[in-house]
Image (tube, grey):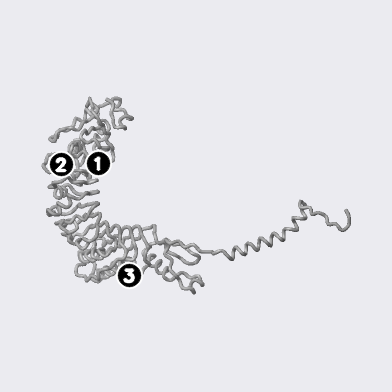
Amino acid sequence: MAHGKKPNPNFSSPRFFLRLLPLVFVVWATMFKAAAASEDVRVPRAPVFYQPKPKPAETQRGLISLETKEILEFFEMFEVKLGTVNFGRIVSILLNQKNDCVLDLRKCPVEKIPDVVAPGIYFPRMKIFYRAGPNPTPESLADTVSRFTKCLKVLGNMAAGSLILSGEGTWMNSATGLVMPDILSLRIGFEQVALVGLSPGLLEWALASLSTCPQGQMELILYKMDFVETLEILNCLCQKKITNLIIFDLINLKTLDCTVLRESRLEGTLSIYNVSLDIEVPDPVAKALSETCWVMVDMEEYLWLIVFGDAVCPVIIESLYLRNFPTLEYFECSIAALLFRRNMKTKNLELALASGSNGVLYPDNVLPLLNWCSSKDMGSLRHIHIKIVSGKLSKQLPVFMCKRPVNMENLPDLESITVMSIPWTLVKGYISSRRYSLIVDIPCSYTTRLNMDTITQATPDKLPNKDNSSQGCSVM
């Protein structure tokens, strides 16, 4: 090689790459610093959290917000654990709580109930109750009412799927002379409200406060209040849309007359049972109820006949549940039953029998009911369920149901018949032999006891094929 000439660099030499490493490191570090300086780093904040705004000094010291701490302590007195999330050292409360909120007012004196609780917290179910002793004093009753009203006022900024106010039925009849506080102005409504065992004054106050809820519709439940004789107490809710009205164990209720029922403001479920046997239903109320298209009606048999027995137009009900239903010819041959059947337009019928024969349900208790249902006027029936309230099934009934599929020719849309939890096989179409199939076309005067010996002596190999019977047909 001649002197004065530089050698050509060898790019494949390891020494060449080692000399480039410092330069590559400097370039990479410069680019990283520039990217970090220009990047806008944001701390994500989910909108579903209730996060108080602590003071800057508290944030710097890493202390829990005083407001959040008071809320947690308030619910801890009732052994209610709220769902929380931590942002660093800041505790935030979840807006949508997964657990129910049950507040026993005996655990919290009125002076320890705060004036304000964080708004917007939602519970699936909220129950506020108080269980007093057998002989409450006027002072204890006044203190109980104060706890109820203040607690509901505090929680009026919160939301719940259902709200239950319960006096547990121990002090309601004694708290009649108490002065009730001003009506609350609730900011958040409830989908379902249950008022259980309240005093007359507290019931009136609670209904008036519920009338201020911004939510336009609710389900209302009234339970175990012996002093209630009329439903006029609901008139304050006439501007609300009560989708479902459930009334039970108001044993002294004497009339259904009220604006809510008279103007037919309901559209979902009407459930009334265990009320006075002498209850009165004015004609305007009966007319309005019979002209409403119901999702479900749940009544005792005698009340059904009072409310819907004189209906001129067909009564349209998605699901009908009749309690204390008679089992024998007393009802099936009456004029009321014929009116009932003529005016019935329902898809799901459930009959809760008061009792069977000596407390036992036999096939001849069930067959007249199926015959009663087997009518062209009730052709829209899809499901029939029969059960007994007090008593048990006879041993012959499951055997009879297994060996005798039933064919109800006048109910083409019928899909199922169950007695208690036992399904009854349905047979559709023309059947040439009745030896192993029962066709329900017996007259209304049917009262003959079945020959159970003939039924129980049938041999299994002559019964309908199991696979075919599950498809709704039988093999003769």
Q: Is residue 316 left or right of residue 63?
A: left
**Image coordinates for residue 402, horizontal then vertical, percent:** 27, 32
10 Å neighbourhood of mark 3: few (<14), some, or many (≥20)?
Answer: few
Q: Quadrant of residue 227?
A: bottom left
In the image as oriented, which residue stretches furthest toward the left? Answer: 335
Q: Which mark is residue 368?
A: none
10 Å neighbourhood of mark 2: few (<14), some, or many (≥20)?
Answer: some
Amino acid type of the residue tagged 3 in the rendering: Pro
Write down the residue under mark 3: 109
Write down the residue under mark 2: 342
10 Å neighbourhood of mark 1: few (<14), some, or many (≥20)?
Answer: some
Amino acid type of the residue tagged 1 in the rendering: His
Write down the residue under mark 1: 385
Tag 3 secondary structure:
loop
Q: Is residue 445 left or right of residue 453?
A: left
Q: Quadrant of residue 72?
A: bottom left
Q: CA distance from mark 1 to mark 3?
A: 50 Å
Reading the chain from its start, which is encountered first: label 2 or label 3? 3
